[in-house]
Amino acid sequence: MPTVRRTPHFALCLLLSLALFMWLQASSETRPAHSPRPADSPLLDSLLRSDPKLTSVIKQAENYEVQIIYTQINRDAQNRPSFIQHNFRLNARQYFNPASLVKLPVAALALEKLNQLHQPGLTRHSPFSIGTAFRCQTPVPYVTPADSDQLNTVGNYVKRMLLVSDNGAYNRLYEFLGQRPLNERLWALGYPETRIVRRFAPCDTAANRHTNPFTFYDQQGQPIYQQPAAVNSRPLSFPLGRITKGRGYQAGGRIIREPYDFTTANYLPLQTINDILKAVLFPTSVPANQQFNLTADDYAFLRRYLGYTPHASKFSFYKSSRFYDAYKKYLYYGRNPDAATQADLRIYNIVGMSHGYLADVAYFTDTAHQSEFMLSAIIYVNQDGILNDGTYEYSSVGLPFLGRLGQKIYQYEADRPRANKPLFDGVSPAGKQN
C-alpha cells in the first residue's frame, strides 16, 4: 500500500480547518441559523389585494419592504386561546431598523431583573441615581420631586417608553440591564437572532458596550442596592453580516453619497417582537422556558401601559395636547391627531419610527364584537433614498397604509365566526384563565 506523504501545506490546511471549526462552534450562540422564508398566507394576501386603499402599496410591496403578521385567536370552552398565524412577505433576513420596538423587551427584562436581584425593598417604585464611567454617558441625580410621576424609577421609565416611546427612558433601562446580559437573556428565552446593542444617542459602538453605575434608594433616601459600571468585553457578532441601505445619508449638515451602514445597529426581526408581545400578553401560551420571570402584577402593569393612550393613563408628563390619543397607535388610527378613539376598541402595542421605517406590533380587543387578533407590520417609506435627512413619506404613505391595514383586519375579524367568544376581564387580555 503506498505511503501518503503529508506535506507542510497539508498540515497547514488541517490546522486552518480545525481553527475554522472551533470558531464556528464558539460563535454559534451569536450566529443563529435562519429558517427559510415562510410562505405567504392566501387569506392575508386576498384581504390585502381586495382593498383599493391598500393595493397601491401591496403592488409595490418589495420596494416598500412590507412585512405583515396577522394572527387569528380562537378560544376553547375554557377561554384558553390558540393562535393561527398568517404571513405576508415575512423574512427575518430582510433587515429593517426596529427603532423603538426594542423598548418592549427592555421594559420586560428591566422588571424581570428587579425580581431576580432578590434585594429587600427594591421594586419598580424605588428611586435611583445614575453615575458615569465612560464616554457618552450622562448622569441622573437622586431627586425626590413632589410629583411621584417624575421620580426616576424603573416603573416610571417603563411607563414613558410604553406610553409615548420615550428614548431617554429606554437609554436608562438599557444601561441598567447591560449590553451582554440583556442580549444573553433574550437568547436564553428563545430569541437568538436578536441584537440590542445601542442607546438612542450618538454613541459609538465601543461606548455602547459600556454602561453606567446605578444606586437605588429606599423611601428614606438610604441606598439599598448599588450596581457598578459594566462593560461587554466581547463584542457581539451580527447575524446578517454587513447591511447597507439607500444611496446616501445626511451627516454634519451635508449629504454623504454612499449607503448608510446598519451593520452594528439594533436587530429585531418582526417574528421575534411579535412573539415577545404574545409572551407578555399570553404568558401561559408559550413554553415555560420562554416565559419572562415576572409576577402577575408585573404582567398587569405592562399590559396596562401597552394598552393605555397618553391621556387615559393620567400620567402627569403627558397631559399636553402634544401627546394625543393616537400618538402611538399606527395600526387602525394611523397616528392621526384628530382621530377619536373607540371606547370598545383596545390596542396593546409597541411601535417604531426611524430612518424611513414604520412598524407597529399590536394586539386588538373589540368588546362590541367580542373579537380579538394580533397584527404586526413594517413599511419602509424613503423615496429619495437618502437617510437621516428627515424626508420620509410617513404621513403621505406609511401611516395611512398602516391605519387602513388595521381597519381592514378589524372589519374582517368583527365578522369572523367563532365557536367561543373571548371573555375579557378588563385586566388581562387572556381573560381569567391567565
Image (cartoon, rainbow, N blue to C red):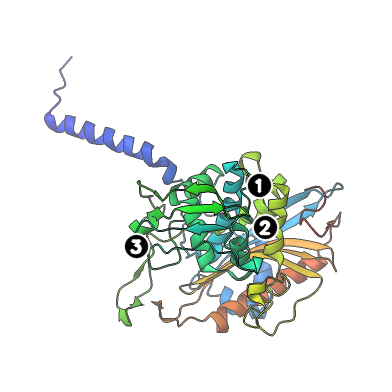
In the picture provided, is 21 more to the left or to the right than 143? left
In the rendered image, residue 121, in percent from the top left (x then y), is placed at 63, 47
Type of residue at label 3?
Asp
The residue singled out by tag 2 in the image is 302
Q: How far is disc 1 from disc 2 in space, using C-alphas?
A: 10 Å
The quarter holding residue 22 reads top left
Cβ atoms under marks 1 and 2 closer than 8 Å: yes
Looking at the image, which residue is at 69% across and 74% down? Answer: 332
Helix, strand or loop at label 3? It is loop
| Mark found first going from the N terminus, 1 or 2 | 1
**Crowding at label 3, few (<14), some or many (≥20) Cα neighbours within 10 Å?**
few
Helix, strand or loop at label 1? It is loop
The residue singled out by tag 1 in the image is 294
Type of residue at label 2?
Leu
**Crowding at label 2, few (<14), some or many (≥20) Cα neighbours within 10 Å?**
many
| Mark found first going from the N terminus, 3 or 2 | 3
The residue singled out by tag 3 in the image is 204
